Image (cartoon, rainbow, N blue to C red):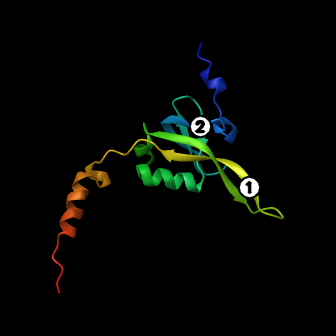
Amino acid sequence: MDMGKYGAAPVRPEDVRDGPRQEKILDVSINEKYDVPVLHFAGGDTFMLNNTNTRAMNRAYGTESDGWLGQVVELAIGSYTDYRGEKPEERETVTLRAVTTRQPSADNGGAKGAVALRDELNEEIPF
C-alpha cells in the first residue's frame, strides 16, 4: 500500500533550512480559503504561492498554469520583514526559483515572436 499521501504536507521553512530542494510540478490548484495558487509536486508535497512567488512563476513559465506543469522549481529558505507588530521583525519564508526554462512555441512568443521582434528592430531610423 502506498503511504506517500499520508506523509505529504505543505512545504515550510523547516523543510528547506538544511538546503534547497528541487521539485517537479504535477498539478496546480487554487486554495479556496486564501484564493492563491497551490503547486502540487511529484514528491507529494504542496506549496502555496504568495504574490512574490506567483510573479516568479509568471515570469518563468507564463501566466497560464498549464505552462507550469512538468516544470522544476527550487525551494529555498528566505526571509521577509513583518511590519505588523510594534517593531519590524524578520521572519523565515520559503522562496521559489525557476530551474527549468519554458520551451519556446508560437503561442508564447518563441521562434515566431523572435522573428517579428528582430524585423521590428531592423527598421531604419529616419534622421
Camera-nearest residue between 104 and 89: 89
**Quick check: 88 above or below 44?**
below
Q: Nearer the viewer, mark 2 or mark 1?
A: 1
Residue 67 at what x, y percent from top left? 40, 45
**Which quadrant would residue 10 be assigned to in this image?**
top right
Q: What residue is rendered at 22% in x and 55% in y?
A: 112
Residue 83 at what x, y percent from top left? 75, 63
Q: Is residue 104 left or right of residue 40?
A: left
Q: Secondary structure at mark 1?
A: strand
Camera-nearest residue between 118 and 48: 118
Of the two numbered discs 2 and 1 on the same chain, state the one appearing first in sequence: 2
Instruction: Mark 1: give few (<14), some (14-19) or many (20+) Cα within 10 Å.
Output: few
Q: CA distance from mark 2 to mark 1?
A: 24 Å
Is residue 117 visible in the rendered image? The answer is: yes
**Quick check: 86 above or below 8?**
below
Q: What residue is rendered at 17% in x and 73% in y?
A: 123
Is residue 63 visible in the rendered image? The answer is: no
Q: What residue is rendered at 57% in x and 38% in y?
A: 20
Q: Residue furthest front?
A: 18
The residue beneath circle 1 is 90
Q: Residue furthest right?
A: 86
Q: Is residue 52 left or right of residue 69?
A: right
Amino acid type shown at disc 2: Thr
Camera-nearest residue between 64 and 104: 104
Amino acid type shown at disc 1: Glu
Say the numbered circle drawn on residue 31: none
Q: Secondary structure at mark 2?
A: strand
Q: What residue is rendered at 41% in x and 41% in y?
A: 100
The residue beneath circle 2 is 46
